[in-house]
Image: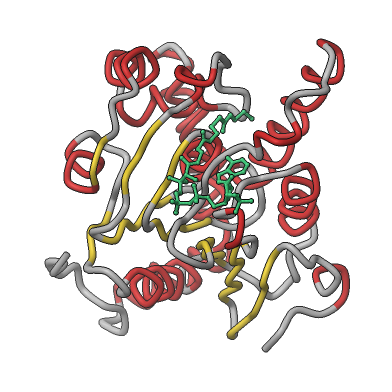
Amino acid sequence: TPATGLLAGLDLLQISQDGAVLHIRLNRPVKRNAINDGLIAQLHTAFVNLPADVRAVVVSGEGAHFCAGLDLSELVERDIHAAILHSRGWHAAFDAIQFGRVPVIAVLHGAVVGGGLELAASCHIRVAEDSAYFGLPEGQRGIFVGGGGSVRIPRLMGAARMTDMMLTGRVFDADQGERYGVVNYRVGDGAGLAKGIELARKIAGNAPMTAFAVMHALPRIVEMSPSEGLFAESLMAASASNTPEAQARLRAFLEGRAAKVVKSED
Ligand code: 1HE
């Protein structure tokens, strides 16, 4: 069903909901989904106003590319203060994705470059079609990443690879993206959305507290010292296991009513 309420007026996004899964499609194909001030504001608005019954989100791009990054036509006139505020606006939007209420799956195809890669890096799982390729043309444009790329991209592929991309303009294809930790799932062209929605449905079936712990505790624990991390893990684990939903799920397994662990086909 199409979006309603606060999400209905967002004309640069195409939003639809099917049960607990919300699909947000970047919808500026003429500009290759380049992110202008309007689009970043609409992404922020969408992610802070997710309907209460949504349990997972899929983000994709309309047209031949996922996203061409920052809309360069708006960059020229900004002074330093405006440029800092602009970058901070991207941070707020992408923080709303990474540290929001529900997990977000990016479905990638064609160009995933500059701010498009920063957007993908703020999502929790990335599915890439064969056509996907990854670049950081900031180096060639005389600028720097400003949408959280220096924080999130090295945590996926390592600082050495990001340094190479920015200094030499090197572009990674979908195979390299997978090998280097950017891509979780590889699918053929045209199969990305179905895969993204399949994964979103699995995620939507989990206890919300588990999604919360993975999204909010895990990335923080990774940055802690081992001693602090282990302590924080104990607090998170105790909180999660004492929810009624966890108790019901544990009982279901012990009574033979829950699924066993099986090998994935991916
Ligand atoms: C754009 C943008 C854009 C396309 N800003 N207008 N990002 C980049 O440096 C990537 C620049 N874009 C490209 O390299 C290519 O456009 C693509 C590889 C993404 C796609 O190529 P293609 O042949 O399919 O499309 P096109 O013909 O290049 O573009 C179609 C139109 O979109 C054209 O406009 P038109 O009026 O001539 O039709 C392009 O100018 C326009 N377009 N990409 C503005 N990015 C928070 S900091 C983040 C910093 C960054 O992201 S820097 C990286 C910016």
Q: Which of the 4 image quadrants contains residue 72?
A: top right
x, y percent for residue 119: 54, 43
Could you say where residue 177 lies in the image, as x and y percent from the top left?
25, 41
Q: Quadrant of ligand 1?
A: top right
Q: Quadrant of the N terminus?
A: bottom right
Q: Quadrant of residue 144?
A: top right
The quadrant of the rendering that contains the C terminus is bottom left
Vertical position of residue 176 compared to residue 136: above or below: below
Compared across the picture, whether 50 is left or right of 157 comes to: right
The correct choice, above or below, for 236 with respect to 161 in the image is below
Q: 202 or 92, which lies in front?
A: 92
User: From the viewer's perspective, is residue 72 above or below residue 210?
Assistant: above
Residue at 46% x, 39% y: name it: 117
In this view, which residue lies farthest toward the bottom?
A: 1
Q: Is 58 left or right of 192, judged from the image as shown?
A: right
Q: Residue at x 74, y 70 (%)?
A: 52
Left or right, 200 with respect to 40, comes to: left
Where does residue 56 sit, x and y in percent of width and height? 55, 66
Left or right of 263, for residue 174:
right
Residue at x-position 32% and y-position 74%? 190
Examine the image and state in which quarter residue 25 appears. Answer: bottom right
The front one of 237 and 130 is 130
Q: Position of residue 112 (x, y in %)?
A: 43, 45
Tally of marks: 0
Q: How is the image coloured?
A: secondary structure
**Looking at this view, is 241 or 174 the one in front?**
174
Which of the two residues, 264 or 210, is positioned nearer the viewer here?
264
**Which residue does the image show at 80% across and 49% down from the upper left?**
38
